[in-house]
Image (tube, helix red, strand yellow):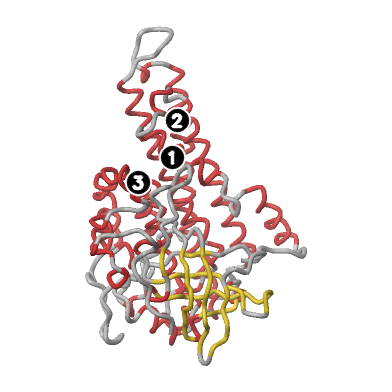
Amino acid sequence: MGAAAGPIGSFSLPVALSPGTFAGATREGIADMTAPEPDLTQEEMVARARALAPEVREDAEAAEKRGYYSPALHQKFRDAGFYRIFVPKRFGGYEFDFPTYYRVMLAIAAADPGIGWCLALGSSHALHVASYYPPAAQEKIFGPTEEFVAPGSLPARAKPQCVATPDGDGWRISGKWPYASGSPYSSHLLGGAHVKDAPDQRMMIVIPRDQYEVLDDWGAILGLKSSGSNSIVVKDGWIPRDFALPMEKFGPSGADTPGWRFHGNSLYAGQFLGYAGGSLACSQVGAAKAAMAEYERIIRSSRAHYGADVLKIEHPDFQRVFGLGMSMTLAAEALLLDTGRMYMEYSRGEVSGEPFSTLKAYQMMGIHHQIIRLAWEAGLEFFRAASSSNALDGQPMQRFFRDLATFKNNATHQADFFAPEIARVYFGLAGGLTL
């Protein structure tokens, strides 16, 4: 086994965030693992997220400078159960559905999009592990970990910088995984890797916290500065053989997923591409909602610079912007929540005999891209009409715009780049996205 990593990268974190604490208190076994609040309802969890919004807003400016949300917020997210939404019940989770996950993440992201991104990406990959990895691996991954928090990172296929080498009954791991959103509080990394001497063979591997370090390399970017999207480095790690799965295993498998057979919940019978874009959309819809609230504050408290001497809220130009932006924001939110319903419906159908096909997953990804486009257009409307004084450093509107603009040039989520793949799958032509 590789030696345990020291402090995260070259920067110091509070003692409360030592690597051992990231991974949580270890447990002796998996017997009697129940959620801290077995009777917690979905509505109660959503209410907790909404109640935490003021504290998220209060931490936003410091989180940008820090690169991730505060230890105090992390503890409150833990206490609220947010990291356990998709963790199976047998491992102390809640197994809540997708609409609940989206509502929780939207409430946090509408308070601060970067913090929402960090939380959503760190908490969502429990579903990935619970759906696809074999029971024995799940027991080893979820079992010893008090809180499962796992960023995902898929380095470019053309650059095999992350390598898995067969080594006895496991894999020797080395590499650097960039943009690992949620890494500061992570217990594991879910990452893509090439097999040594077989560069065309790619694996999805789960790496425990004691095998890696998180670099202090996040923040020199336009926006989403508080998303904790640091790089993760493994110098000489080792994982058991069943912590690695061929990438093709993450395609359509439906009711044959290990998760469905192991947990008996159709939540774990879905498809990765059916939800991958939704987690990202939470932050962007949250940014549009945050910009809408800030724009409303601005036009309620400032006067028009031309025409009648009235508050901007009384001026038709500013009313027009607000009405249009609000409509797009609400449409994006409604669509996102509906894709949560779709995911659950498709997953149940897979179990009952109606396949959660690749086409359905691709179509859902396309819808998520349109949700993000609506959020961008709404945020742009609010930003352009907010006046230059709200584009100054330190102004919330500037931060929300930067968070939207940073995702706008995300290379792997350009709607028009992905659209031909959707069409090829629909028409039964060769192609299809390769993770």
Q: Which residue is mark 1?
A: 288
Task: Return the residue nearer the eye: 400 or 289.
Answer: 400
Residue 266, compared with residue 285, is above or below; it is below
- Residue depicted at 56% across the width and 63% down the height: 273
* Three-letter amino acid code of the residue under disc 2: Phe
Q: From the viewer's perspective, is 278 left or right of 390? A: right
- Distance, label 2 to label 3, CA atoms, is 25 Å
- Give neighbour class at mark 3: few <14, some 14-19, many 20+ (Cα, 10 Å): few
Which residue is disc 3 drawn over?
65
- Ranked by sequence position, the earlier of labels 2 and 3 is 3
Residue 246 position (above or below residue 215):
below
Q: Are marks 2 and 3 in contact (CB under 8 Å)?
A: no
Residue 2: image location, x then y, percent: 43, 81
The residue singled out by tag 2 in the image is: 382
In the rendering, at what x and y percent does residue 300 appear?
32, 23
Residue type indicated by callout 3: Lys
Q: Closer to the observer: label 1 or label 3? A: 3
Of label 1 and label 2, which has the lower sequence position?
1
Residue 407 is situated, as x and y percent measured from the top left of the image, at 52, 46
Secondary structure of the residue carrying tag 1 is helix
Q: What SS does tag 3 mark? A: helix
Residue at x 43% of width, y 28% of height: 322
Is residue 219 toward the left or the right of residue 22 in the image? right
Are the residues tagged 1 and 2 within 8 Å (C-beta)?
Answer: yes
Image point 56% across, 78% down: which residue?
164
Q: Position of residue 104 (x, y in %)?
A: 34, 55
